[in-house]
Amino acid sequence: MQANKETLADRPDAGPQAASEPPIIELKGLTKKYGEFTAVHHLDLAIGRGEIFGLLGPNGAGKTTTILMMLGLAEPTSGTARVCGLDPVRQSLAVKRRVGYMPDDVGFYEDRTALDNLMFTARLNRIPEEEARRLALELLERVGLEQASGKKVGAFSRGMRQRLGLADVLIKRPEVIILDEPTLGIDPEGVRELLQLISDLSRKEQLTVLLSSHHLHQVQQICDRVGLFVQGKLIASGDISTLAAQLDEEGTVTVELEAANWSAELTERLSGLAGVIECRVAEGGRQGETAATLLCRSDVTADAAAAAVDCGARIVSVRRKQYGLDDIYHRYFEGGGAHG
C-alpha cells in the first residue's frame, strides 16, 4: 500500500452510520510520547455508532495506550480525542459514565459471588438497589452465568471471569464498550462463545464495540472494520475486502485453477487469455493434478474454466483468490515500515 493511499480511516464517512450522525469515537492526530519514544503516532480514526471495530496489532504496538487516552487515563502529547462527543482530558468522568472498559485481566472480589460483584459495580454507578438487582440477574443470564450467580468468583474459570467482566461493563448501560484482549487465556470453544456473545449484544443493543487484539482470526469473525496498528501507527483501516483490494497496488487479480489431464495446450491457452499478465504452472497436486496461478488485469475465472474444458482437462477447482486476514496481516505487518 502506498503511504499516501487513502484508507477508510482517512475518510469522513468511516463507520456504518457516520453519514447520518457524527462518529461516536473520533481521534485526530492523536499522539503519545514518553521521552524520545513515540507510543502512538498521529492517529486518525473515526468509528460509527453500533460498529464493531477491531484494533489489530502485535503486543507493544500502542493499542492499550490509545485506549487509555480515549478513557482519559493518559493525556495525549498532541492531537484530540472525542468519545460520545466528549473530550476525555477535560471530561474524563463523563466519558467513564458512557464507556465500559474491560481490560485483559478483570479484577473482582474473589471471596464474593458473581451477583455481589455486579451489585457493587452498580452501586458505584449510583443505580438504585432494586433496579441494580434486576439488571445484574438479567445480565448474568445473558452472559450464560445464571447458574453461577451465587458462586464465589475465586472459583471461576478464565472464561467465566471474562463473561462476568462483560456483564460488569454492561451494567451501567454504556454507549461504547472497549475490550482489551478479551479472549486471552480462554479455550477455543470459550473464545467462540464469547465472541458470539459480543456480536449479539452489539447488534441487539446498538452498542459500539472497540476490540483490541493480536489474534487476527478472532477479529475477522466479528468486526465490521479492522485497523492495523504497527509501531504506534495506524497503517491501514477498512473492512476485509477493502484491505484485501489494497494489497494489489496495480489493481491485479489472481485466479487459481487446479485440474487433472493437463496439457501443454492448456498452458498455452491460459497464457494467451486477454488480461493475463503471467501464468505460473505447478505439477504434483493431491491426486497428481496440475495447478495454475494466473496474475491478471481483470477477473478471468470463467474464461480459464472454459479453456480447461475445451482442452479436455478435468477441473478440480477454479476460483478468484480472495485475500483473508492472514494474507493481509502478513503483508502489512511484515512490511510495516514500508507501508507506514
Image: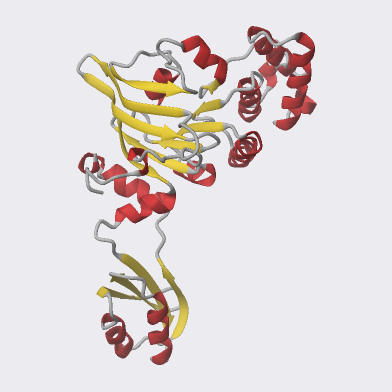
* Residue 114 in sight here: yes
Name which residue lies at 76% across and 29% down: 141
Horizontal and vertical percent for residue 92?
A: 46, 11
Name which residue lies at 43% across and 70% down: 319
Horizontal and vertical percent for residue 186?
A: 57, 33
Residue toward you, 119 or 16: 16
Quarter of the image where one finds residue 208: top right
Image-based side of 182 in relation to 141, left or right: left
Horizontal and vertical percent for residue 266?
A: 33, 87
* Residue 106 in sight here: no
Quarter of the image where one finds residue 188: top right
Q: Is residue 164 above or below residue 248?
A: above
Q: Is residue 167 above or below residue 221?
A: above
Name which residue lies at 56% across and 19% down: 98
Quarter of the image where one finds residue 302: bottom left
Residue toward you, 304 or 176: 176
Image-based side of 17 in relation to 329, left or right: right
Residue toward you, 124 or 27: 27
For the rendered model, the colour scheme is secondary structure
Horizontal and vertical percent for residue 336?
A: 26, 41
Quarter of the figure that contains the C terminus: top left
Q: Is residue 65 above or below residue 302?
A: above
Name which residue lies at 41% across and 33% down: 46
Image-based side of 9 in relation to 316, left or right: left
